[in-house]
Image (cartoon, rainbow, N blue to C red):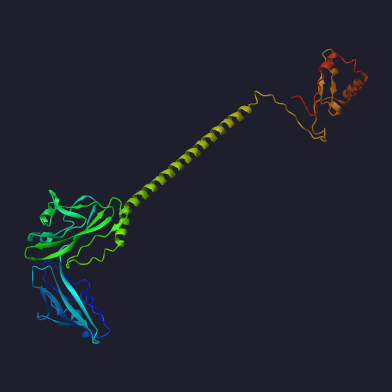
Amino acid sequence: LVDAIAEKGIRYLLNQYRANFCRTHFGAVSDGDRFKIIYKITKPPENGTLYWVAGEQEVRVFTQHDIDEERILYAQRNMQAFQDRFEFSVENEFNDKVHSTTYVRIIPVFHPRTLVTDANYITPISDAHLNASIIKNSNPRFYVTEPPHFGSLVISPNINKSVDFFTYDDIMNKLLFYISNKTESLVLDFAELQLDADNVQPSRFRFNIEVHPSSAINYIAPIDKEMNASILPDFSRSSLLPSIKSLLLYLPITLFFSILVVFAIVIIFRRHSKNQKQKRLEAARKKREFDARMNTNLEKKSNLLSSTVYATVGRSRHESFDKRPQRALQTFDGSKRPESLISSSPRGKAQSRGFSSASLDYQAASSHNTPEPTRSRADRYHSTKLKENQYWV
């Protein structure tokens, strides 16, 4: 089987007059030998001629190998034409045959940029969209061969009237505008323009226009009229592409609000942490004040000068009296002589310090011989009894 590939046709720039055939234009695929894939011109071009590169003789039959080696070219003869076409057949050694038609088109010297606008809005068209500066010395001018479908091209100040002709000077002077109609969906509009200039052949191209509504929710494809054969089919604009562009339209807004949310969260957390820090500082300050008050109270309570102190000394019940001699408590009677001191020891545990054994015998005898009732009032009053293990200090 033979498959002749010539989807893009043959193109060459404005101000050029010939184009070589290559595998991009014609690439037949067959199971046989490429030398045996034969092209036959069934209808020659109208505005030009097919030639052999070597010798510049008109060609009607050639092989796939000749195309691979770029031995065939197209030369334009009619300088007023913007396109051409011819028909041919392809067959191989197995007698498989395919008929096809290809177009020869002249493309402009610049790449037109898509105009993006809003619904029901007037948008200027600048040289950023249609830049013909490379041929500005040749008086470039544009013809509107097919007007837009969802708007109109106007020239200031007559913005109420659509134009079918404008110059490159109008673009440079910012006099050309596109007025879009009201729409509730994203619309892909276009205008077919023909660029003419002095001493060059014309070229036609499509000027694409995107009309965005205030809120794009759906996509309506433009109602395409029967288009001139010079306009190439635009396979890059599928039904999914507008939806993707609608999403991309809202992407900056989404990013902006996301950044705002992140900043708000950061500010909230910082305020929360600041409040927590203040609470911790307040708690620490209160703790320090409480500790200071407690220390002041303890200092006040530890003042012994204004307090009465009672001392109790504990002794072991079995402690030897020889090791810790104690002074006996004595009372004195002013009516008696000093030698009549009587030693008093509770329960017989205290001993007199500094007296001889004779005085002890005398005191013991006196205590046994003197009855209790005969003891004087001063003896009774001056005798002081302390609790066990309590002593005068």
- In the depicted structure, whether residue 72 falls above or below residue 363: below
Res 295 quadrant in image: top right
The extreme right residue here reads: 369
Residue 129 position within the rendered picture, expressed as x and y whole percent measured from the top left: 18, 57
Residue 74 is left or right of residue 245, and the answer is left
Q: Residue at x 86, y 27 (%)?
A: 347
Residue 69 position within the rendered picture, expressed as x and y whole percent measured from the top left: 18, 80
Quarter that holds the N terminus? bottom left
Q: Which of 133 and 106 lies nearest the eye of the viewer? A: 106
- In the depicted structure, whether residue 337 falls above or below residue 28: above
Q: Residue at x 63, y 28 (%)?
A: 301
The extreme top residue here reads: 335
Residue 81 is left or right of residue 348, and the answer is left
Residue 288 position within the rendered picture, expressed as x and y whole percent measured from the top left: 54, 34
Q: Residue at x 18, y 62 (%)?
A: 206
Residue 174 visible in this rendered orientation of the protein: no
Q: Which of 181 and 188 lies nearest the eye of the viewer? A: 181
Residue 5 position within the rendered picture, expressed as x and y whole percent measured from the top left: 23, 76
Q: Which of 124 and 178 lies nearest the eye of the viewer? A: 178
Residue 34 visible in this rendered orientation of the protein: yes
Quarter that holds the C terminus? top right
Q: Residue at x 22, y 50 (%)?
A: 121
- In the depicted structure, whether residue 292 falls above or below residue 370: below
User: How many numbered marks are there?
Assistant: 0
